[in-house]
Image (cartoon, rainbow, N blue to C red):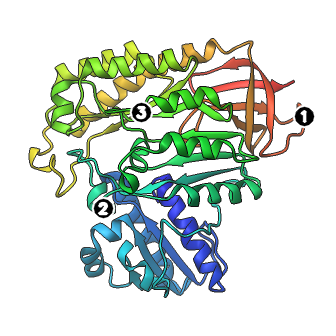
Amino acid sequence: MGCSKNSVDSEVIAAKLKSQGNSVLFESVQNTDYVIINTCGFIGDAKEESINEILIHLERKKAGDVKKVFVIGCLSERYKDELIESLPEADGIYGFKDLNHFLNDPQFDLLQSPDRILSTPSHYAYMKVSEGCDRECSYCAIPLIRGKQISKPIDLLVSEAQKLASQGVKELILIAQDLTYYGIDINGKRDLELLLRRLASTEGLEWIRLHYAYPIGFPYEILDVMNEYSNICKYIDIPLQHVSYQILQSMRRGGNSAQNYKLIETMRNKVPGIAIRTSLITGYPTETKKEHKELVQFVKDMRFERLGVFTYSPEENTPAFPLGDPVSQKEKNRRQEELLSVQNEIAYLQNQEKIGSVMRVLIDDLDGDFYIGRTEFDSPEVDNIVLIDKNEKPLEIGTFQPVYIEDAGAYELIGKVI
């Protein structure tokens, strides 16, 4: 359940289970003996989804379809005692500190373990470069769940990348709670630039993608590396969350409107054609209609290539929790829809400009009558897709193809291989 960081955890745990003689699948099937649910505990909707998934499999256990149900992950780390009390039918509820016991291996280390079984298609993989977070954003429970930042040493990451590439991985997606803070806990300085240079030299890696950068103190040198190496995608995911000075201060994000405008301008000047993905939070407790209008104008001005909008979710024990939740869910949804409507128009016009061009596309899947692909400017599951008629020509999943763009919508390009 939840984010790509959770997916990597599941892959590491699956490899450990397999080494102990088990067969492991990343899906719910009828003939399994055990079900392990790796939960998300980040925001309200994700927690509810995790609880519902647990209840589904506890019902399967009651019906005799499975023998045992185990619960691990962020939800069980954050609410372990409550889950044990409310879900006595579960055969085990384990937080991160208990995984050694769950896996019967006192030496097991979730971050440092070198083995994984990919849950993604074999041609791309996520790589978690660090665990935890040193930031203190007022709305975020991640530091409560995952703790302070722990960076994985560069040599281990390079070794992992080489192993993945030897197995056929062509795209490596770097993830962390704060990617730009990588290495600060190891030797007191940011080492993302060095890491990128080492990874970019890995034979077989054709795309390296950056996710979850932090805006304050952004290390501009990584943009120079992006220009220097053709296999580092001109793409960055940098959650800005808001633009209002008052909201950013309350969120404990720091910065102001002028700094955010300048950051995006500098990125685009340094890396022409870069695709910038950001995420925003609407309905924060102190956000008035004035701050919302400021955020809408920011989206109009910046014309982000990719954008996600989340409605605020009050989380216990976070600094923002005492502020309450004064903005109604109806109003949060309205503000979210307004922001996405603005972005929808921007995305449509940007994609229309691509009609008539030829783009390098990575083929991810075959779905019905269409191959599903992505460009350098799109991350899996969250960004645009490229649709290619399967009847035009048989294509191999995981290959790169030159595609002539014939048509476009707001979130998809339609083309043919040339």
Q: CA distance from mark 2 to mark 3?
A: 23 Å
Q: Position of residue 335 (x, y in %)?
A: 29, 28
Instruction: Give the secondary structure at mark 1.
Output: loop
Residue 95 appears in the figure? no
Quadrant housing residue 190? top left
Give x and y (percent) for residue 198. 61, 46
Relative depth, front residue between 187 and 248: 187
Single out the residue that lies furthest toward the front. Answer: 187
* Secondary structure of residue under mark 2: loop
Whole-angstrom CA distance, mark 1 to mark 3, is 44 Å
Q: Which mark is residue 393?
A: 1
In this rendering, which labeled residue sits more in front, label 2 or label 1? 2
Q: Which amino acid is tagged 3? A: Pro
**Circle 1 or circle 3, nearest the eye:** 3
**Tag on residue 219?**
3
Of 223 and 252, nearer the camera is: 223
| Tag of residue 147 | 2
Examine the rendered structure and indicate whether residue 247 appears above or below residue 252.
Answer: above
Q: Residue at the location (43% across, 48% down)?
A: 182
Query: Which type of secondary structure does the marked residue at label 3 adopt?
Result: loop
Q: Are marks 2 and 3 in contact (CB under 8 Å)?
A: no
Which label's residue is closer to the chain start, 2 or 1?
A: 2
Q: Quadrant of the C terminus?
A: top right
In percent of width and height, residue 144 lies at 26, 60
Residue 47 drawn above or below residue 253? below
